[in-house]
Amino acid sequence: MKKSSHPRNSIRRLIRKIERKIIFILLALFFIVLLPLGRDDYVTFDLIYTTTISDVFPFIRLPMFDVYPLLNILVFIVMGYIFYIIIFLFVRQNGAERLRVMYRRLDIVGFIVYLTTFYIIINAFFFSLASVEGMSMYPTLNNGDHVIMRHYDEAYERGDLVVVTVDHTGADYLIKRVIGIPGDTITLEEGIVYINGTQLDESRYLPDDTETFCERDIRFCSFDLEDEEFFVLGDNRNDSLDSRHFGAVLEDNIYGTVNFRLRPLSDLGRIE
């Protein structure tokens, strides 16, 4: 007949399980906290990092809550609970039922932390969510549209929709269309776009009567693109802040490509 294990052995095994779970949760928390140091460009698009306390609780009117990320609250709560468990393990290791309750609660805490970590990994290395502000990409995109940005592929091609950042524009990021790639000469003449002397066919995404003039309605201008330089335009050529105004965009200032729209649901699907 098999003898039952001693209660103290069961408690020790449970304590070891709790310790292992704490280690994995702490590693996940460190990853969450340290990731922005290496992928800070994408924090702008990560709701985990950018959502503040005031965003979730708008009735709380305190200045610090407008800038204090909700993620910090999650980290502090989890760290506080883990600290409480560690103290309990050191002070009192004979409360078997209390340890089981802690272990079950750690399962819930771990699930939340791991799910958050998974979302952050996807956001930092593969896909991010972005929202459209303004009408500079009309008729392709409208104000308030929510899109998915892909940033694991940095081979940008002519016609791609890209998310860029440009200094002194007053915006964190802009969504534009790639018109010229490194080595191209872009010419705007009498409302027509020429690439290396050949008229660009934009009928796939623009109305046939669209005209593209230079800054301030100048009827002729030309841009030569160097290595890692891209020329971008908004599809709404009469109401777009783009390379006609701020010049070529460096490849390092391109976050990724926009290929899919999430909202509104009536327009859900791939974007041309």
Image (spheres, helix red, strand yellow):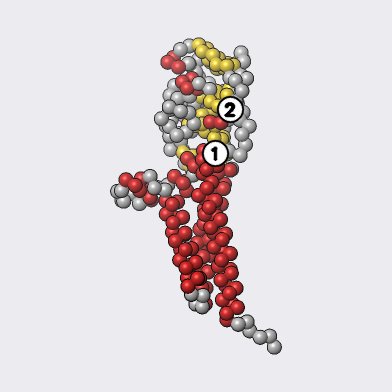
Q: Which amino acid does label 2 sit on?
A: Gly
| 142 horizontally vs 200: left or right | left
Q: Picture coordinates of residue 139 (x, y %)? A: 48, 29
Q: Picture coordinates of residue 135 (x, y %)? A: 43, 30
Quadrant for the N terminus, please: bottom right
**Residue furthest front in the image:** 90
**Residue furthest bottom in the image:** 1
| Number of marks present in the image shown | 2
Q: Tell me which label, 2 or 1, sits earlier in the chain.
A: 1
Q: What residue does disc 2 label?
A: 159
Q: What residue type is labelled 1?
A: Met
**Residue at 46% across / 20% down in the picture?**
245
Q: What residue does disc 1 label?
A: 149
Instruction: Give 126 or 262, whichever is nearer the viewer.
Output: 126
Quadrant for the C terminus, please: top right
| 71 horizontally vs 197: left or right | left
**Residue at 54% across / 59% down in the picture?**
25
Answer whether residue 146 is visible to the viewer in this image: no
- Note whether 188 is above or below 149 in the view shown: above
Dot 2: element = loop
Q: How far apart are marks 2 and 1 (CA)?
A: 15 Å
Task: Say few, some or many: other residues with alpha carbon within 10 Å of mark 1 (under 14 / 14 to 19 / 20 or more).
Answer: many
**Residue furthest right in the image:** 1
Q: Picture coordinates of residue 31 (x, y %)? A: 54, 51
Instruction: Give 176 or 15, whichever is nearer the viewer.
Output: 15
Q: Quadrant of residue 241?
A: top left
